[in-house]
């Protein structure tokens, strides 16, 4: 679980710059010393290079200070989707990000257990990082279902959203959610999914190049997805 953030060291800096959506760019925080934090949720079953590229794209394009990976105990819109245990998914994720300073992992949803609703997770992080600017990273497919998320009206007041657009694909229309603060981020087109990788593992096909090496080794040594 991530730690508490520091209290603000001063008042707003008066920077009123805005991006194309009328929002402040991440560098223009509400307080001196505030931190821009991105959160990437998912089952990570298994984690693959698409997850890491999404995190890196958001980190660089949005000038985030760090990205926190939030593995879900059970995603609400994907019932029964988790195959590997919490322990195995967490171990693969730890191996995948290694010692990278600007990538972190939160075990909040795993420790809480049950269905992982984003609103409950964001309430936790909003308290932990009371003075920082929080961003929830989503893909184009998630953006189209955003209006279905539990307590979306409350959620959009606590966190901003980053949508990773896929090159060569039409830009998804922003959902009609009042108060939604949405940032568009160009992503990389990486056609790989955890479902595909589980099937490759079941068939005994190599996972190299689709996943970070340490995660590949972990899958092999623990006989996952067979």
Image (cartoon, rainbow, N blue to C red):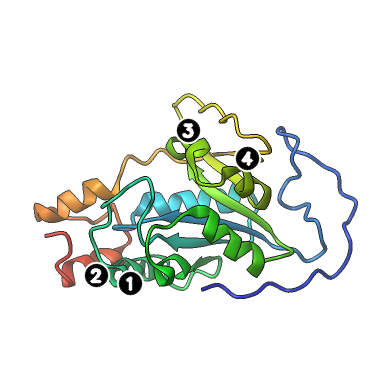
Query: Which one is in front in this view, the residue at disc 3 or the one at disc 1?
Result: 3
Furthest toward the top, the residue is 170
**Rounded to the nearest whole Å, what is the CA distance between mark 2 and mark 4?**
35 Å
Q: Which tag, 2 or 1, sits closer to the chain's start?
A: 1
- Disc number for residue 218: 2
**Quarter of the view holding residue 215:** bottom left
**Quarter of the view holding residue 183:** top right
Is residue 155 left or right of 206 when viewed as pictured?
A: right
Residue designated by label 4? 183
Contact flag, marks 2 and 1 (Cβ < 8 Å): yes
Q: Is residue 78 above or below residue 141?
A: below
Measured as percent of width and height from the top left, residue 224 is found at 17, 64
> Which quadrant does the C terminus fall into?
bottom left
Disc 4 secondary structure class: strand
Q: Which tag, 3 or 4, sits closer to the chain's start?
A: 3
Contact flag, marks 1 and 4 (Cβ < 8 Å): no
């Amino acid at each position: 679980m991530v730690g508490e953030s520091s209290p603000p060291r001063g008042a707003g800096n008066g920077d009123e710059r805005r991006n194309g959506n009328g929002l402040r760019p991440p560098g223009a925080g509400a307080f001196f010393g505030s931190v821009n934090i991105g959160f990437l949720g998912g089952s990570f079953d298994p984690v693959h290079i698409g997850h890491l590229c999404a995190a890196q794209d958001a980190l660089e394009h949005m000038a985030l200070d760090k990205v926190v990976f939030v593995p879900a105990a059970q995603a609400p819109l994907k019932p029964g989707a988790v195959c590997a245990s919490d322990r195995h998914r967490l171990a693969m994720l730890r191996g995948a990000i290694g010692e990278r300073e600007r990538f972190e992992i939160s075990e909040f949803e795993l420790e809480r257990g049950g269905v992982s609703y984003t609103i409950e997770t964001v309430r936790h992080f909003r308290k932990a990082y009371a003075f920082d600017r929080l961003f929830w990273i989503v893909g184009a497919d998630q953006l189209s279902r955003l209006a279905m998320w539990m307590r979306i009206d409350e959620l959009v007041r606590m966190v901003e959203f980053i949508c990773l657009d896929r090159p060569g694909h039409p830009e998804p229309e922003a959902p009609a959610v009042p108060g939604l603060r949405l940032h568009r981020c160009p992503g990389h087109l990486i056609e790989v999914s955890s479902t595909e990788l589980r099937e490759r593992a079941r068939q005994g096909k190599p996972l190299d190049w689709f996943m970070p090496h340490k995660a590949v080794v972990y899958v092999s040594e623990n006989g996952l997805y067979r």
